[in-house]
Image (cartoon, grey):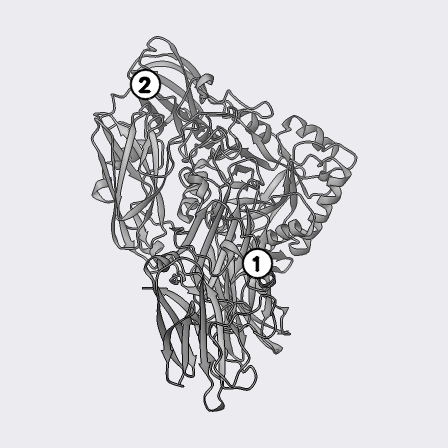
């Protein structure tokens, strides 16, 4: 079963018996919400994994990696021969060398963020969450089948934090200067096949920083290997952005084709557009001629009558299947999801989607999550975006960088508008390539409505800034003529020459006090609030305790440059000419701890905390942004022992008309609702039940209540989903809480909890406490203000994943979710690392046997040519040839001994090792030979004396390698 089928068949999966206790909480949540209720959505029965239609020949390369934390300096090169050799192709030195011994490195599976496992250290960078980052090395052995010979082969890295150097078979194939762009490496010309294994090495420099927030460290996004026909569609090679014209909708399809063959090729593409039911709605063909080692474009335009439009509420998608044919046979295929929609930014009336006004209700977000850092599983990204949708948000600004492609897949499918942002403001070739890569990759997506070229650049109000942006806009428009370009400005809008003159939509970071002034001076310029608010809250806290780095959650504490949530939304909502908002931020994030520093290690800006648990701001914005259903939430909790008789500030967050507040059945007061401010009371504390009654049109619509609870007596575990895919990849969060004797959530519980799991792996832990220094890996985490989170990854065996939680003095909790059979995404199998003997040299043929112990002069680069095992080459006349090479066995062979394996030797032969004969082959027929290697340290010298029989050249017809016993 594949993931798409899995999604369809699990929609009706019943909740397991272990989860039935959740039903009472769900029922209460349907009536309204209070802080003492369980502050998360109910368990879902349906699977919601991202669905990927991988192109043929595309497989993950994520298992079987070896990792070393810390840098490994290359050896100091000495001697003429060594110097000469090191300057040649494939001669990388040190840890990048093909023959490097990585046997004592850790074995890991990608994606991987090594910084997520580090504890905060006050000596480390504050902006990077006080996490040590440094350097890391990754190595992977790859085997390609003989059938792959002649194909185009590409390795795709989704993202590496931060700078990276990549080697393939000892050759540098990429230097990458950003942690956010993908790296596509063509290894077709360097690949080995069959027994000739390939070595992929990545050195990561995470000392480099591109941002002032936590950026993680390592290969933290997916890695793929792609195998394509010699004539193929390039990566990101389909441009098919639907557009509406006077005669209806069309999809102009442009396929960029590449040819690595030796002859010019004629190719034809077939483009087929299908709707959500799989029905064909349009098709067409186009052709192109592609010269060798060149690219060409094939074009076709599809006409589509009355498509179902994509919107944030109805994200209707179509699939474009583009197939490449040669000689009537399919050679390549690519699938792209498309959405039909129109949008525009109006300078007077804001944003319009499909001809209807729509206020952008967005959030800014970094890409890290509690417990996993930036290596966020795909299914957790689905969870995060779904949380934003539950908030009432319809847009996201990925701050301040390109997101993972899998995240944009989810935005397309879930209906979230995207401001797609470039990372670094630079028009030099390396950085312009990052910008154009972003546009090429994402220009088909219905979710993407804005390209942002920078964030808050000091030269934004200067002629230099204007000229740089003018060039960036031109590069974007060359690739995409439909979407507007913006820049997130925080000053400089009124200078004589500034960035706002070069962009299509002006983005305001804060600066809300000049909205009216700018609009009056520039009435034809569309504008949006690209970043605003910066209000502080600690989830579950309702009093300021600044010495303890705690901020109360009443939306009264903000940064000097920002506004409260209520002020900011009012400034945007009451101005039709402002297209919308992007609140800083949807989630708390590691790093940039504000307004405190050590020991605080994460921000306090979020509408939700690091785990995605709701703060008061969640209920506030939901009440302001959601109009299609009644909402009523009440804060704070009602556990204030020792505060009897003292006033407690109470807020109702609602989209209703009026709210009446009762304490233990007696009316405290009643207020009309101002949705920009929200009803507030000062209530003398008395234990019991505080209840809000919401009215619309004079009629009671909803009630919400908080109650004084008892002490915690038991733990509770609540998964997000009742079923998971048994594919080794699916992940989900479990919420951990404590309940009293009546089963009520205790919002003030702060208890240590220990976890155990079967059927899966715990990959991250969190509790939303910005001041916590507990490990985010392992099996222990304390509740913070009543909550903690465990992120688990399912095994690849069907059955059940069982998580248990225990805490001293409390009843333990046990939760089970079903692991349903699901087809895993294809993975390139791990090849057992072996040491291939490199740098073998061949003597001139001789009429007499050649001394196997003969030395080669250090400066002799010509009389002993280098040979590649597998290709037998004559070297003059004579009966005898000698082959010499050196190698240092891997650690296990040095310790226990091993075998020197010749995949094929043609002709009778003697094998000498360190001056001693260790093996003999008597037959002239090509054959395999294995000789033992005794243990021992140091470099080994190998000689193979081959006899050329009956005038036929003998030699090494296959690779030579060292294997463990």
- Residue 503 lies left or right of residue 646; in this view the side is right
Q: Residues within 10 Å of mark 1 (few under 14, many from 20)?
A: some
Q: Seen from this angle, which residue lies furthest top?
A: 645
Mark 1 / mark 2, whichever is N-terminal? 1
| Residue 965 picture location, percent across and down | 31, 64
- SS label for mark 2: loop
> In the depicted view, which residue is nearer to us: 666 or 742?
742
Quarter of the image with the N terminus is: bottom left
In the rendered structure, find residue 597 and report the number of the disc placed on it: none
User: How many dots with numbers?
Assistant: 2
Is the residue 645 above or below the residue 120 in the image? above
Q: Find residue 540 and report its horizontal and vertical position in percent.
A: 39, 25
Q: Are marks 1 and 2 in contact (CB under 8 Å)?
A: no
Q: Is residue 751 above or below residue 450?
A: above
259 vs 533, nearest the viewer: 259
Residue 910 occupies quadrant: bottom left
Residue 532, position in %: x, y?
A: 58, 31
Identity of the residue furthest to the right in this view: 496
* Residue 356 seen from this side: yes
Q: Is residue 53 visible?
A: no
SS for callout 1: strand
Question: Circle 2: is it few (<14), some (14-19), or many (20+) Cα within 10 Å?
Answer: many
Q: Position of residue 43 (x, y in %)?
A: 31, 41
- Disc number lying in front (1 or 2): 1
> What separation in Å lies between label 1 and label 2 (alpha carbons)?
62 Å
Q: Residue furthest bottom?
A: 950
Side of 700 relative to 362 (left or right)? left
Which residue has dot 1 on it?
Answer: 172
Is residue 336 positioned above or below 452 on the image?
A: below
> On residue 639, which mark appears?
2
């Amino acid at each position: 079963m594949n993931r798409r089928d899995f999604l369809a068949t699990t929609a009706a999966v019943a909740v397991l018996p272990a989860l039935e206790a959740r039903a009472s909480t769900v029922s209460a949540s349907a009536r309204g919400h209070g802080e003492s209720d369980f502050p998360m959505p109910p368990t879902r029965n349906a699977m919601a994994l991202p669905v990927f239609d991988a192109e043929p020949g595309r497989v993950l390369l994520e298992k079987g990696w070896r990792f070393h934390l810390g840098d490994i300096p290359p050896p100091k090169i000495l001697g003429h021969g060594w110097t000469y050799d090191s300057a040649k192709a494939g001669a990388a030195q040190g840890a990048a060398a093909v023959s490097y011994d990585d046997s004592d490195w850790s074995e890991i599976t990608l994606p991987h963020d090594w910084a997520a496992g580090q504890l905060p250290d006050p000596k480390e960078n504050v902006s990077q969450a006080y996490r040590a980052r440094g350097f890391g090395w990754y190595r992977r052995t790859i085997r390609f089948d003989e059938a792959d010979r002649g194909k185009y082969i590409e390795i795709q890295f989704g993202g590496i934090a931060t700078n990276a150097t990549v080697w393939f078979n000892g050759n540098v194939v990429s230097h990458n200067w950003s942690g956010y762009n993908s790296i596509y490496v063509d290894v077709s010309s360097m690949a080995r096949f069959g027994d000739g294994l390939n070595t992929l090495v990545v050195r990561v420099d995470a000392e480099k920083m591109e941002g002032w927030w936590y950026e993680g460290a390592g290969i933290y996004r997916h890695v793929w290997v792609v195998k394509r026909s010699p004539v193929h569609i390039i990566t990101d090679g389909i441009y098919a952005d639907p557009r509406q014209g006077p005669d209806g909708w069309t999809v102009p399809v442009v396929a960029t084709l590449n040819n690595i063959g030796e002859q010019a090729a004629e190719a034809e593409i077939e483009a087929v557009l299908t709707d959500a039911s799989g029905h064909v709605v349009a098709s067409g063909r186009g052709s192109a001629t592609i010269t060798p080692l060149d690219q060409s474009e094939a074009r076709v335009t599809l006409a589509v009558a009355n498509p179902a439009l994509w919107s944030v509420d109805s994200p209707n998608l179509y699939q474009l299947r583009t197939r490449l044919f040669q000689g009537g046979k399919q050679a390549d295929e690519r699938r792209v999801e498309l959405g039909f929609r129109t949008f525009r930014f109006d300078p007077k009336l804001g944003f319009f989607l499909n001809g209807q006004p729509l206020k952008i209700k967005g959030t800014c977000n970094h890409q890290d999550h509690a417990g996993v850092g930036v290596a966020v599983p795909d299914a957790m990204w689905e969870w995060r975006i779904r949380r934003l949708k539950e908030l009432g948000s319809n847009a996201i600004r990925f701050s301040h960088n390109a997101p993972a492609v899998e995240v944009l897949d989810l935005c397309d499918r879930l209906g979230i508008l995207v401001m797609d942002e470039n990372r670094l403001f630079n028009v030099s070739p390396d950085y312009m390539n990052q910008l154009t890569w972003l546009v090429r990759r994402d220009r088909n997506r219905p979710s993407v409505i804005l390209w942002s070229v920078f964030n808050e650049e000091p030269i934004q109000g200067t002629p230099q800034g204007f000229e740089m942006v003018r060039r960036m806009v031109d590069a974007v428009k060359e690739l995409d003529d439909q979407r507007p370009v913006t820049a997130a400005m925080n000053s400089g809008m009124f200078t004589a020459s500034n960035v706002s003159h070069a962009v299509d939509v002006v983005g305001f970071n804060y600066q809300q006090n000049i909205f009216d002034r700018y609009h009056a001076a520039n009435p034809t310029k569309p504008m949006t609030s690209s970043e605003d608010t910066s209000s502080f809250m600690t989830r579950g806290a309702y009093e300021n305790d600044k010495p303890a780095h705690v901020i109360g959650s009443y939306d009264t504490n903000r940064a000097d440059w920002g506004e409260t949530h209520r002020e900011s939304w009012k400034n945007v909502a009451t101005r039709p000419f402002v297209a919308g908002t992007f609140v800083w931020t949807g989630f708390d994030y590691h790093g940039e701890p504000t307004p405190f520093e050590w020991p605080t290690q994460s921000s306090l800006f979020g509408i939700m905390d690091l785990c995605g648990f709701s703060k008061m701001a969640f209920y506030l914005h939901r009440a302001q942004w959601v109009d299609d259903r009644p909402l009523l939430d009440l804060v704070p909790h009602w556990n204030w022992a020792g505060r009897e008789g003292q006033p407690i500030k109470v807020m109702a967050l609602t989209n209703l008309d009026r709210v009446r507040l009762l304490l233990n059945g007696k009316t405290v007061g009643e207020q009309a609702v101002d949705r920009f401010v929200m009803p507030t009371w000062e209530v003398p504390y008395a234990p019991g039940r505080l209840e809000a009654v919401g009215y619309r049109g004079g009629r009671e619509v909803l009630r919400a209540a908080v109650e004084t609870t008892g002490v915690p007596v038991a733990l509770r575990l609540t998964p997000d989903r009742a079923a998971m895919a048994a594919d080794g990849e699916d992940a989900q969060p479990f919420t951990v809480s404590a309940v009293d004797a009546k089963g009520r959530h205790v919002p003030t519980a702060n208890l240590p909890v220990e976890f155990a799991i079967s059927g899966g792996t715990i990959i991250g832990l969190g509790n939303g406490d910005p001041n916590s220094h507990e490990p985010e890996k392992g099996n222990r985490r304390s509740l913070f203000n009543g909550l903690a989170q465990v992120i688990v990854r399912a095994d690849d065996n069907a059955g059940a994943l069982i998580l248990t939680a225990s805490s001293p003095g409390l009843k333990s909790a046990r939760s089970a979710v079903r692991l349903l059979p699901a087809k895993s995404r294809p993975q390139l199998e791990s090849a057992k690392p072996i040491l291939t003997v490199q740098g073998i040299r061949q003597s001139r043929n001789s009429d007499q046997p050649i001394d196997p112990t003969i030395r080669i002069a250090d400066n002799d680069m010509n009389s002993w040519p280098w040979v590649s095992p597998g290709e037998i080459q004559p070297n003059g006349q004579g009966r005898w040839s000698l082959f010499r090479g050196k190698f240092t066995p891997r650690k296990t062979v040095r310790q226990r001994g091993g075998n020197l394996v010749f995949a094929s030797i043609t002709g009778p032969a003697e094998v000498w090792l360190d001056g001693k004969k260790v093996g003999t082959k008597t037959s002239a027929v090509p054959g395999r030979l294995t000789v033992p290697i005794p243990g021992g340290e140091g470099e080994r010298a190998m000689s193979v004396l081959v006899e050329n029989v009956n005038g036929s050249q003998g030699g090494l017809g296959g690779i030579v390698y060292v294997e463990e016993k």
